[in-house]
Amino acid sequence: MTDVIIVGGGPTGMMLAAELRLHDVRVVVLERDAEPPRVVRSLGMHARSIEVLDQRGLLERFLAHGHRFTLGGYFAGITKGWPERMDTAHGYVLGIPQPVTDRLLTEHAAGAGAEIRRGSEVTGLDQDADGVTVELTDGTRLRSRYAVGCDGGRSTVRKLLGIGFPGEPSTADTLLGVMELTAPPEEVAAVMAEIRKTQLRFGAGPLGDGTFRVVVPAAAVAEDRTVPPTIEEFRQQLRATAGTDFGAHSPRWLSRFGDATRLAERYRDGRVLLAGDAAHVHPPLGGQGLNLGIQDAFNLGWKLAAEAAGWAPDGLLDTYQAERRPVAAGVLDNTRAQTVLMSLEPGPRAVRRLLAELMDFEEVNRYLIEKITAIGVHYDLGDGHELLGRRVRDVPLKQGRLYELMRRGRGLLLDRTGRLTADGWAGRVDHVADGSDELDAPAVLLRPDGHVAWAGDDQQDLSRSLLRWFGAPISPGNPVSR
């Protein structure tokens, strides 16, 4: 029996696998596809995901394969300047194609010791008081203590659990593909600039080697979205939208996606949990989907590892749903709002013009971009210091940068007083008697995901928070399980 089976080897599954391996949890990743997908659904990573990469020592690896951008237009395509004074040391978008992100996270998970099985499609799942049994198409049965469905919007795991997925069905499909265009690049750019004045679901961007990533509205909602469109369908829709098909030919891959908006009724059923698109789907406006999944994994990983290790306090694993489901609901709402703002109808166009005027105020622009980039996420951890539940940006310390001190995936007591202690939680919480004037608190207790679990200067109050988040202290009579 292994500790955790992860169904789905996309960015969410691989990030989760690596987070679990930080704590020596035995992990098997089951991926249906025999080969990594080539589809470039996501083109970038937002600030909070960039912070996550930095907190685990991965950022330089990603920066080497991407480009930093500080461009406006991430909220409903409304073009405004990049906001100033964002609460992050990484105030930019990292442009990087999803296949590269997939590869780097897979290498990270495999390097951490996760077992990855490609060509392994799950068809059955049962659980009992001791564990979970997963059945594959070839009849193989695998046993684990826990399982996590990271298998996308059509999640087999979610369906096998019978978890409801309420929301709105797709009302408009969009075609997406990579192909060659015979039209000169300057002609493509000129046509795109003109059409996008009104139709923001259209685009044709060069990828190099004569290929373009093309996005265009579909003629209708497909009955079966798993069936890819044809190049002729692309040509027809390009002519209908832009008046030209740009001489499109030689497709590398073609796909379609819808604008369905759905949220799982619950993220946990006994020993099985959901993460990423298996738990939530929404239109791709603002480029939030991949980022939301990675952040799900970052929240869940240390909690599930604590459960597997036997030291998790009561209710810790349930905080995953309590914290992440409201975040997903917020993303669904902001994509609903963006969808309305991109309508060609007079009413939504009037609201769009009004919002564009409001975004000239720096505070409004920054608020909306911090919502899209997830650095405004604030978990409800109860009453207390204003930092409670918030993530902390990277800050310089005498002993290095804050994020450099978090790479082992442990909690961190950052103590400016020099008189606090977390000695009973060795191996779970690191204590750094250091501080930064940029932190408006005498001391903070950071969870492994970088969110503030406690702030203050009282040892007794700190000890209560350590018990709440990191379990009973370790003693000769109460050793750590693993």
Image (spheres, rainbow, N blue to C red):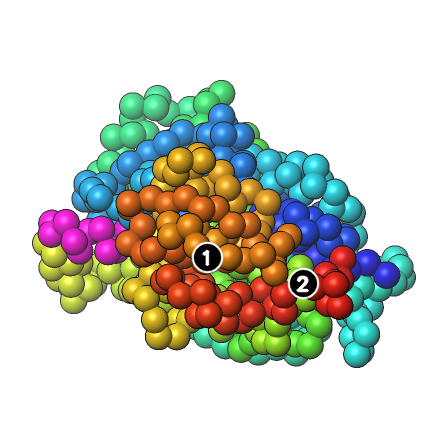
Q: Residues within 10 Å of mark 1 (few under 14, many from 20)?
A: many
Task: Tell me if 339 is positioned left or right of 480 in this view.
Answer: left
Residue at left offset 84%, top offset 64%? 143
Determine the main secondary structure of the stretch shown in magenta.
helix
Picture disc at residue 420: 1
Q: CA distance from mark 2 to mark 1?
A: 17 Å
Picture disc at residue 121: none
Q: Position of residue 307 (x, y in %)?
A: 68, 66
Queried whether the magenta region covers residue 366, the answer comes back as yes
Q: Earlier in the sequence, mark 2 or mark 1?
A: 1
Instruction: Kindly identify the amino acid type of the residue bearing the numbered disc 1.
Output: Leu
Instruction: Kindly identify the amino acid type of the residue bearing the numbered disc 2.
Output: Ile
Q: Which residue is mark 2?
A: 474
Using the image as rendered, state which of residue 234 and residue 50 is in the foreground. Answer: 50
Residue at left offset 49%, top offset 26%? 64
If the image is split into quadrants, where does the C terminus sit? bottom right
Q: Is residue 68 visible?
A: yes
Q: Position of residue 106 (x, y in %)?
A: 65, 40
Q: Position of residue 238 (x, y in %)?
A: 38, 42
If the image is split into quadrants, where does the N terminus sit? bottom right
